[in-house]
Image (spheres, rainbow, N blue to C red):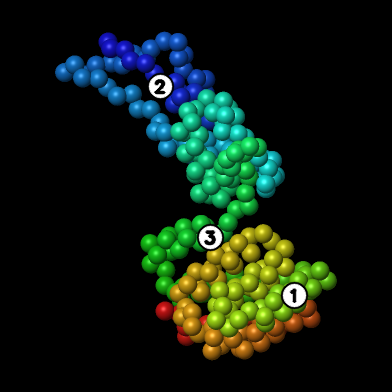
Amino acid sequence: MTRRPAPADDDAVSARLTGEPAADLSRDTEVPEHGNGSLFTLEQPSNRKLAAGIADDIEQYIIRRGWPVGEVIFSEADLMERYNASRSIVREAARLLEQHTTARMRKGRGGGLVVTRPDVEPVTNVVAVCLEYEGVTPLQLFEARVALELTAVELATERVTEVDIERLRHAIEAERNIPLEELWQHTHDIHVAIAEVAKSPAFPLFVTVLTKLVDARAISHASGTRAPEIYHAHSAIVEAIIAGDASLARHRMRRHLEAITPYLH
């Protein structure tokens, strides 16, 4: 039999994440030999896998804390001690958290891992790649958006409050002040505002993702020529919601969305 030291960091971090007892690091790990005298390689988790496990554990901690945006939850030293992990593994975990827009590492005095507000952009990019792989056509993507937004506008009509009415009217006014050449970047804003009035957190997220994906496949310069039509359609939908007429709001939303189809490519 041949002996070699067991990697302390890997064992300890694995134990922290799985709940299993850590290996006895005071003794060497025995490694059996092949018949030809070569050694079996004991499979140890890669640094990246350990970092991903730490990142997942921290995300669950953030969720349990109620997602305290802006709060410094751990310093780098705290993380190294908490997970008995090397600096390189902790920094890789922090990089993954930043990639997920869950938290970021702030340097300097009073620095550490700061909880951040999740960003929908990475989600949109990942969904776009998955849809490309599945061969989803622009029309199929658009059909999903129509189904989602018609439900959102109906729920918004049922649940709208005086505060919501003020917000919707403000959104319409803000849209009218957007320069024509920039309108295409903001046409989804009112759709997200309506989805928020539906009072279900899933709707704004999914509407944001789908509208961005549909807009990315549409001819952007079309917004300039259609600006008055877009303003009018959005205003008409909002007024139907405020009036409490779900049937009219759905009809106007469907007609508005169907007007986009000639610009899909």
Percent position of residue 206, x then y: 58, 64
Looking at the rendered image, the quarter that the C terminus falls into is bottom left
Residues at badges 2 and 1 in contact (C-beta under 8 Å)?
A: no
> Which residue type carries mark 1?
His
Q: Work out whether residue 254 can be spotted.
A: no
Q: Which residue is mark 1?
A: 170
> Which residue type carries mark 2?
Pro
Q: For the residue carrying disc 1, how many other residues have a C-alpha within 10 Å: few (<14), some (14-19), or many (20+)?
A: few
Q: For the residue carrying disc 3, how many other residues have a C-alpha within 10 Å: few (<14), some (14-19), or many (20+)?
A: few
Compared to residue 217, the image places residue 50 above or below, namely above
Q: Answer with mark 2 or mark 3, whichever residue precedes in sequence.
A: 2
Percent position of residue 42, x then y: 33, 24
Looking at the rendered image, the quarter that the N terminus falls into is top left
Q: Kindly identify the residue that appears in the image at 45 percent across and 10 percent down.
A: 26
Quarter of image, res 110 = top right
Compared to residue 180, the image places residue 156 above or below, namely above
Percent position of residue 212, x then y: 53, 69
Q: Which residue is mark 3?
A: 121
- Callout 1: SS: helix
In this image, 113 relative to 7: left or right? right
- Callout 3: SS: helix
